[in-house]
Image (tube, rainbow, N blue to C red):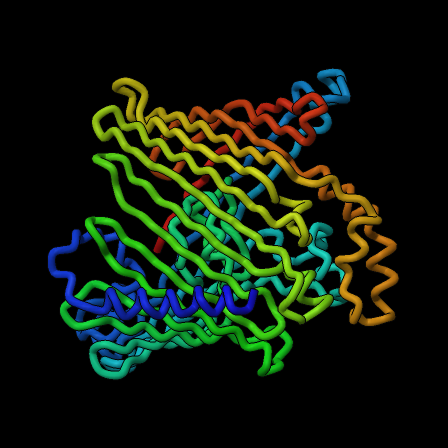
C-alpha cells in the first residue's frame, strides 16, 4: 500500500509539471482565484489601502428566535409543548485589524465574540473536550496572520487562518483536511476555524495556475508530527481543477481532487478524498500494512434565476469512514438543499427559504463502541471520568438530528429589522416520529462596519 501511495504522489508531481505552463486561452472565473487575489493584492501598492495605514472593521449579528414543538413522539399537550418553547438569542461580533506597515508586509487579526460571554458547557459529542478542565475563554481568535512575499511570484502567510481548499457549499471534505472545524450546513456563511500554518503560494508567469504549499504546526508541539500539504490548481476548458496531498508522520496519508465549473448556466462543483487508513488504525499501529481504504466524495450544483429571484443549491456528500469516531456523527450518505425566493410576486419585502439536511447511515453510539476511542495515553486521573460519562455522550450523539427540514417566510420591515416564521422539522431516528415545531425569528439590526 505504501507503493500505491507513492505512485499517487508521483502522479501529483507529474500533474504539477504538465500544467506549469501558459494558459492564456483558459476561461477566467472570479471565484476561481479568490484566494490568489487576496495574497497577490497584499503586495500591490494601493489596491487594498495605502502603505502605513491601518483599517479596523468587523461585523455584528443580532437576532432572537423561539422554537415551539407542535408534534413529537412524546405526544404532549399543546400547553406542555408551549412550556417547552426554546428561546435562542444570537449576539455575536467580529473585530478585524488589517495593517499594512510596508508595501510587502501585511498584518491581520480577526477576533470573534458571542453570547453568552462565558462558556459554561462542554460539548459531549467531542471526546477531547471531556478531558479539558479549564473552559475556553469567550474571545475566539478566528484569524491571526502576517503576509509577506519574495518577488512577484512567491507569497507567504504565517499564522492561524482558514484554508479554502474545497469547493463545497454545505460539505467540504477537502477543506476539512487542514481546518479544525467543518462547515455548518445550517449556516454556510459562518467561518470555519483554521490551523496554525505557514502557507506558500507560487504563481507561474503568464498563467493563472497556482501551487499552494502548507506546513501545519503539530497540536502536540512535537516536530515529527508537523503536517505537510500541497495543492496544485489549474484551469482547463473553463473548469478549475485541483489536486493535492496531505502527509503527517504516523497518520493517515490523504490525496484529494477538486473540480468546479459550469454546464451552460448550471454551476457544478465536486471534491474527492482518498485516505489510506483510519485515524484510529494509525493511532493503534503505525505500520503501513493492513489499513482500511477510506473514500469521501461530494457533488453539488447551484443555479440562479435572476428575474424571478430564485436561487437553488443542492449537494450530496458520501463519508465512507466507518472506522473512526465520525461514524457516529455523520458517516454515510448526506444530502443538503436550499431554495430561496428573494421576492414573492411584486412584494420585494417578502421572501421564502426552504432548507433540507439529511443523513442516512450513521451508526448508533453506545458506551461499549465509544470506549475504544478514548485515548489510551490520556491522563490516568481523567480517563476514568471520561469513560464514566460515555453513556451521556452516546445519548447526546444519538439525539443529533438525522434530518432537518425548514420553511421560512421572511418579512423585511426595514433594512435593519425583519421577521421570519415557519415550520422546523427534525428527525432523530428514522424509526420514530419526527418533531414538528414552529420557529419564529427576528433580526435586530447588525451588519458590517
Instruction: Residue 141: give x, y in percent of width and height.
Output: 51, 66
For the point 66% across and 61% down, the residue is 290
> Position of 365 compared to 387: left or right?
left
Q: Name the spot of residue 122 as percent of width and height, x first.
A: 72, 55
Where in the figure is residue 287, as x and y percent of width and height?
Answer: 66, 71
Residue closest to the far left: 25
- Residue at 67% across / 29% down in the picture? 85
Residue 444 position (above or below residue 183): above
Task: Give the quarter of the figure containing the N terminus.
Answer: bottom right
**Residue 203 placement, left or right of 413:** left
Residue 136 placement, left or right of 35: right
Residue 333 position in % (x across, y down): 56, 38
User: Where, quadrant-wise, is the C terminus in this rendering?
Assistant: bottom left
| Residue nearest the observer in this picture, 108 or 32 | 32
Q: Residue at x 43, y 68 (%)?
A: 9
Q: Picture quarter containing residue 146?
A: bottom left
Amino acid at each position: 500500500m505504501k507503493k500505491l501511495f507513492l505512485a499517487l504522489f508521483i502522479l501529483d508531481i507529474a500533474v504539477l509539471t504538465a500544467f506549469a505552463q501558459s494558459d492564456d486561452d483558459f476561461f477566467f472565473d472570479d471565484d476561481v482565484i479568490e484566494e490568489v487575489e487576496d495574497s497577490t493584492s497584499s503586495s500591490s501598492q494601493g489596491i487594498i489601502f495605502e502603505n502605513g495605514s491601518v483599517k479596523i472593521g468587523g461585523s455584528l449579528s443580532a437576532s432572537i428566535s423561539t422554537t415551539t414543538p407542535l408534534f413529537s413522539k412524546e405526544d404532549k399537550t399543546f400547553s406542555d409543548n408551549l412550556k417547552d418553547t426554546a428561546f435562542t438569542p444570537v449576539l455575536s461580533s467580529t473585530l478585524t485589524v488589517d495593517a499594512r506597515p510596508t508595501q510587502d508586509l501585511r498584518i491581520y487579526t480577526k477576533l470573534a465574540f458571542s453570547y453568552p460571554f462565558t462558556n459554561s458547557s462542554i460539548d459531549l459529542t467531542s471526546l477531547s473536550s471531556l478531558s479539558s478542565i479549564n473552559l475556553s475563554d469567550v474571545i475566539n481568535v478566528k484569524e491571526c496572520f502576517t503576509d509577506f512575499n519574495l518577488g512577484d511570484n512567491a507569497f507567504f502567510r504565517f499564522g492561524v487562518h482558514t484554508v479554502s481548499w474545497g469547493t463545497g457549499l454545505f460539505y467540504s471534505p477537502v477543506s476539512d483536511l487542514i481546518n479544525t472545524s467543518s462547515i455548518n450546513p445550517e449556516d454556510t456563511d459562518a467561518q470555519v476555524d483554521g490551523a496554525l500554518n505557514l502557507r506558500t503560494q507560487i504563481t507561474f508567469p503568464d498563467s493563472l495556475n497556482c501551487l499552494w504549499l502548507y506546513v501545519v504546526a503539530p497540536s502536540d508541539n512535537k516536530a515529527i508530527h508537523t503536517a505537510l500539504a500541497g495543492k496544485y490548481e489549474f484551469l482547463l476548458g473553463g473548469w478549475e481543477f485541483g489536486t493535492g496531498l496531505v502527509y503527517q508522520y504516523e497518520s493517515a496519508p490523504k490525496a484529494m481532487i477538486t473540480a468546479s465549473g459550469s454546464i451552460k448556466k448550471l454551476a457544478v462543483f465536486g471534491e474527492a478524498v482518498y485516505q489510506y487508513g483510519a485515524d484510529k488504525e494509525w493511532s493503534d499501529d503505525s505500520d503501513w500494512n493492513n489499513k482500511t481504504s477510506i473514500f469521501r466524495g461530494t457533488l453539488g450544483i447551484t443555479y440562479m434565476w435572476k428575474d424571478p429571484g430564485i436561487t437553488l443549491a443542492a449537494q450530496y456528500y458520501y463519508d465512507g469512514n466507518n472506522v473512526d469516531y465520525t461514524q457516529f456523527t455523520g458517516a454515510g450518505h448526506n444530502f443538503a438543499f436550499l431554495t430561496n425566493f428573494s421576492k414573492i410576486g411584486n412584494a420585494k419585502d417578502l421572501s421564502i427559504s426552504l432548507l433540507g439536511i439529511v443523513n442516512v447511515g450513521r451508526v448508533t453510539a453506545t458506551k461499549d463502541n465509544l470506549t475504544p476511542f478514548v485515548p489510551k495515553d490520556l491522563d490516568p486521573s481523567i480517563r476514568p471520568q471520561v469513560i464514566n460519562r460515555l453513556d451521556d455522550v452516546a445519548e447526546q450523539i444519538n439525539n443529533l438530528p438525522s434530518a432537518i427540514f425548514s420553511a421560512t417566510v421572511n418579512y423585511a420591515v426595514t433594512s435593519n429589522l425583519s421577521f421570519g416564521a415557519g415550520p422546523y422539522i427534525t428527525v432523530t431516528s428514522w424509526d420514530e416520529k419526527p418533531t414538528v415545531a414552529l420557529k419564529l425569528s427576528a433580526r435586530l439590526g447588525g451588519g458590517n462596519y
